[in-house]
Amino acid sequence: MNTNVKLEKWQTAQKRHRLSDKHVQMARELGLNPDKLGKIDNHKQETWKAPLPQFIEEIYFKRFKKTAPAIVKSIKELIADEKTKKERQKKAKEQKRKEKAILEANTETSQELIEYT
């Protein structure tokens, strides 16, 4: 699955369940599925359940022994970072192709010179 599609799913889950960027990042680091958050976020009907942000904080602390991630990035920032990364990779790939074409052209001309002499 495309990473952009995954991030869009998290964006819709963030809106639907009213989560902050911090809670979304913690849930992503925990490996939670954004499509299944509705089952966890049912504290109004099942009063024994904790609200979703509180639940995410609790299981994050149990697993990582810290209250929050060191650096919190929003989903929009992650999408923008992914886009710039892909652009850099395309430019690097194009540069390699150009260098390879120049190298091949030089070897062909040197081969022709050797055959001519």
Image (spheres, grey):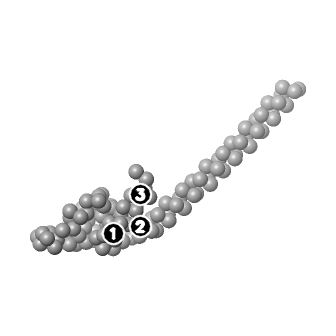
Q: Which mark is residue 5?
A: 3
Closest to the observer, 49 or 109:
49
Query: Which of the two discs, 2 and 1, sits closer to the camera?
Result: 1
Which residue shows up at 49% across the image and 60% down it? Answer: 82
Q: Earlier in the sequence, mark 3 or mark 1?
A: 3
| Numbered badge on residue 14 | 1
Q: Are marks 3 and 1 in contact (CB under 8 Å)?
A: no
Total numbered circles:
3
| Disc number placed over residue 65 in the picture, else none | none
Residue 48 visible in rendering: yes
Q: What is the secondary structure assignment of the residue under circle 2?
A: helix
Q: Position of residue 46 (x, y in %)?
A: 12, 69
Q: Secondary structure at mark 1?
A: helix
Q: Between residues 45 and 82, which one lies in front from this camera angle?
A: 45
Q: Quadrant of the C terminus?
A: top right
Task: Give percent across and percent down for residue 64.
Answer: 27, 63
Query: Pointer 1: residues within 10 angstroms few (<14), some, or many (20+)?
Result: some
**Type of residue at label 1?**
Gln
- Mark sitting earlier along the chain (3/2): 3
Q: Answer yes or no: do the residues labelled 3 and 2 have beta carbons within 8 Å?
A: no
Amino acid marked by disc 2: Ile
Q: Which residue is mark 2?
A: 75
